[in-house]
Amino acid sequence: MAAFTTEQEILGEARRRVRARRGFYVHLAVYLAVNLLLLVVWASSGAGHPWFAWPALGWGIGLGFHFLGAFRLAGGWEQAAVAREAERLRLERDGPAGG
């Protein structure tokens, strides 16, 4: 977990997290609306093979990953990668320690 040292950093991270969650809720609403429409089309066309389930399943997998990222349940790999890259950039800028 990153250590936020200033109030500005804390507020910036809080805004980012709220935007990520809001984005997930918008994605969820669109998913539900489109898949409800597909269900209605399927039902009005004779309700044969439930083809509407395939796009719902595929899109649902993506929605699940969006949930994990928005609510920070997918692990901290991205933060760790950013920290490693920042350290590389610092070394490029400053050169090796003691040299």
Image (spheres, rainbow, N blue to C red):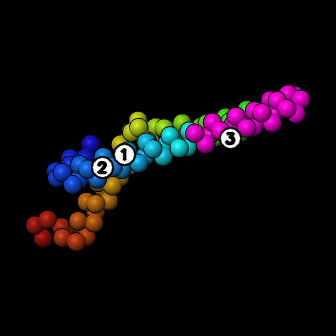
Along the viewing direction, whichever of 96 and 59 lies nearer the viewer: 59
Q: Which corner quadrant of the image does residue 54 belong to?
A: top right
Give the amino acid type for the residue marked by disc 2 in the picture. Answer: Glu
| Residue at image location 85% in from the left, 28% down from the top | 47
| Residue at image location 26% in from the left, 50% down from the top | 11
- Disc ID at residue 13: 2
* Residues under numbered marks 2 and 1 in contact, where contact means CB atoms less than 8 Å apart: yes
Along the viewing direction, whichever of 74 and 66 lies nearer the viewer: 66
- Which of the two discs, 2 and 3, labels the residue nearer the N terminus? 2
Please tell me whether mark 1 sits on a helix, a strand or a loop. helix
Left of 70 or right of it: where is 48?
Answer: right
Please report the bounds of the magenta region as a residue range: 29-51
Give the amino acid type for the residue marked by disc 1 in the picture. Answer: Arg
Q: Which corner quadrant of the image does residue 87 belong to?
A: bottom left
* Residues under numbered marks 2 and 3 in contact, where contact means CB atoms less than 8 Å apart: no
Question: Is residue 14 covered in magenta?
Answer: no
